[in-house]
Image (spheres, rainbow, N blue to C red):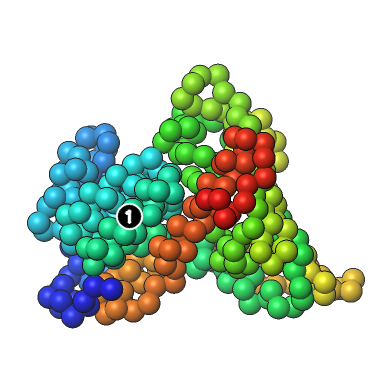
């Protein structure tokens, strides 16, 4: 780990932000609210939108991220833009001696992800992949109550978002978003954080599309067998030909079950249902940002490592290969 006693530890962290979407807005707000950081510059893809965004958050607008990562007055680059570009921006920023925070996924390719971890280590710089799902109320409630159900044999995690008409934006673009469970890596990362390493993956996916680049609906079902013997099913869908929204997490064990439906949780045991309190999802980007600044300035431990995020990316790669081949994929082959 880099030396937290460097001159940077005695001053503000100067930040360059790539992106102007919702995640970037939450990052900018968190950075402005924390006196230990100074948002220096913002880079986006649309000049007018970037200029307005930068003005709103008291920063300088930059024409392109390539210029931002080269600035001498930037210590930390925060990447909050389309998934396709995460790896290239992170590589350039690390090569320029910057700390890097990137919203998941780290990359859409496992090899690129490995290279980024090696580069961060060689440069002695922070590489942090945001996984705020681990900080949220649902995940914390799961961790606190898992022991109640005894030995766990089945988990089902389903997030379905009907959207009609589907927006013609990057989250519905094959190249910009990536394979569904890479682009939405948090669906798998919640499982690997709770249940450990995966043995095999099966996956089926389908798109509804009327043009090559953008689709109207994406639907993906993945089955994971963990080394422990636990079986898990992950359902992820979004778009026009889905009719009922769902955000549900089920844990089934020999002594009971945990059911989280939206923000409501229950423990079921011998015919009795006990409510479980689920904390808020608000303020998680601010919490993540504060922990990053703690880490850079004081060396405090972060809640997730890039190695853990890379492992989940490998699980997503296994699911992708399974969807493409129709075969069961063994994690040892990834």
Q: Residue furthest front?
A: 333
Q: Is residue 274 left or right of residue 310?
A: right
Question: Residue 195 in the image: x percent, y percent?
Answer: 63, 67
Q: How many marks?
A: 1
Q: Is 118 situated above or below 67?
A: below
What residue sits 32% from the left and 55% below the top?
Answer: 116
What residue sits 53% from the left and 27% below the top?
Answer: 215
Tell me, yes or no, if residue 14 can be seen here: yes
Q: Residue furthest top?
A: 210
SS assignment at label 1 = helix
Tell me, yes or no, if residue 165 can be seen here: no
Quadrant of res 207: top right
Quadrant holding the N terminus: bottom left
Q: Is 300 situated above or below 25?
A: below
Along the line of sight, the residue nearer the viewer: 133 or 232: 232
What residue sits 20% from the left and 54% below the top?
Answer: 95
What residue sits 90% from the left and 71% below the top?
Answer: 271
> Residue tagged by mark 1?
116
Along the line of sight, the residue nearer the viewer: 143 or 55: 143
């Amino acid at each position: 780990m880099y030396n937290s006693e460097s001159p940077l530890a005695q001053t503000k962290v100067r930040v360059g932000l790539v992106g102007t979407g919702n995640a970037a807005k939450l990052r900018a707000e968190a950075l402005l609210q924390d006196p230990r950081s100074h948002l220096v510059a913002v880079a986006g893809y649309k000049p007018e939108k970037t200029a307005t965004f930068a003005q709103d958050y008291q920063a300088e607008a930059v024409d392109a991220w390539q210029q931002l990562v080269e600035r001498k007055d930037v210590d930390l680059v925060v990447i909050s833009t389309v998934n396709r570009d995460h790896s290239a921006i992170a590589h350039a920023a690390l090569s320029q001696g910057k700390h890097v925070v990137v919203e998941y996924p780290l990359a859409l390719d496992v090899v690129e992800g490995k290279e980024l971890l090696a580069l961060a280590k060689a440069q002695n710089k922070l590489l942090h992949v945001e996984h705020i799902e681990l900080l949220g109320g649902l995940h914390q409630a799961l961790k606190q109550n898992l022991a109640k159900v005894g030995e766990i044999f089945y988990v089902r995690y389903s997030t379905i978002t009907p959207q009609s008409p589907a927006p013609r934006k990057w989250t519905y673009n094959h190249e910009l978003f990536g394979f569904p469970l890479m682009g939405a890596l948090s669906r798998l990362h919640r499982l690997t954080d709770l249940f450990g390493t995966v043995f095999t993956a099966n996956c089926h996916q389908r798109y509804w599309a009327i043009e090559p680049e953008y689709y109207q609906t994406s639907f993906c079902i993945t089955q994971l067998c963990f080394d422990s013997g636990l079986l898990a099913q992950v359902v992820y869908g979004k778009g026009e030909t889905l009719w009922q929204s769902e955000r549900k997490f089920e844990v089934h064990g020999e002594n009971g079950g945990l059911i989280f439906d939206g923000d409501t949780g229950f423990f079921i045991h011998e015919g009795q249902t006990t409510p479980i309190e689920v904390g808020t999802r608000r303020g998680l980007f601010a919490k993540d940002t504060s922990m990053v600044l703690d880490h850079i300035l004081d060396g405090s431990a972060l809640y997730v490592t890039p190695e853990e995020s890379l492992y989940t990316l490998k699980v997503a790669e296994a699911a992708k290969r399974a969807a493409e081949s129709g075969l069961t994929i063994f994690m040892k082959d990834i």
